[in-house]
Image: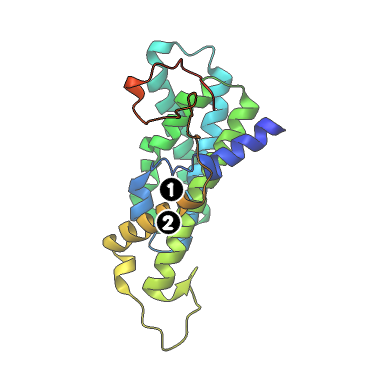
Amino acid sequence: MKAILERLYNGLIKENPTFVLMLGMCPTLAVTTDAKNGLGMGMATTAVLVMSNLLISLLRKFIPSGVRVPVYIIIIASFVTIVEMLMHAYVTALYDSLGIFIPLIVVNCIILGRAETYASKHGPILSIFDGIGIGLGFTVGLTVIGIVRELLGAGTLFGYKVTPENFEPISIFVLAPGAFFVLSILCALMNKIRPKSAKRRTVGKGGCNGKCDECGAKEGGNE
């Protein structure tokens, strides 16, 4: 249970793909003109991430190392095709809104990265929850950016008017510059509130002078 919770925490906070790792920036900046698009893209990516992590983990001992990346791409592309067809059939409006960015999930570096760094080295259960954690982190990131951009740029939230009648929308927030501005502010906030990944190392009485190449202390000294 601890390992599962750690996978979820890792994806949401410690290694959030949007605000910490800065991965998947193409859909992040392009589709988050409103909250609904951000949520839809995040959920589609999460579905592909979980299914591809599971299958790659199950097949990890049978995939030759020399062809592992082409095999990963084939697996990911297969699941993307399934998700795309389901969206086209059942959520046509969202499918039309996301457009070309649905098939581009195939080349999303988040999915291939998790396949290479985690699913190919761990069992199916942890790989599933790693996919869920990273997918939720990506979904939250896109949805929050979409909420801010839609609220300031159109005065709506998930398509519903929530601002006063005299509110004047700031149209730049639904344009490309607004995406960069909102992302930068949210990344700064995330870096401010998330736990530090490392503590300053002190060596002996003199402490750390910040010049690692001049330090004669053995690696793994006093913390």
Quadrant assignment for the N terminus: top right
Can you give x and y, in whole percent of width and height, for residue 208 in the image?
42, 29
Which residue position is annotated with label 2?
A: 186
Res. 50 in view: yes
Q: What residue type is labelled 1?
A: Phe
122 vs 197, nearest the viewer: 197
Give the mark, 1 or 2, whose residue is nearer the N terminus.
Answer: 1
What element does badge 1 sit on?
Answer: loop
119 vs 202, nearest the viewer: 202
78 vs 2, nearest the viewer: 2
Res. 88 in view: no
Which residue position is annotated with label 1?
A: 19
- Marks 1/2 in contact by CB < 8 Å: the verdict is yes
- The total of numbered circles placed on residues is 2
Can you give x and y, in whole percent of width and height, for residue 201 in the image?
48, 29
The residue sitting at 37% across, 49% down in the picture is 27
Q: In which quarter of the image is residue 175?
A: bottom left
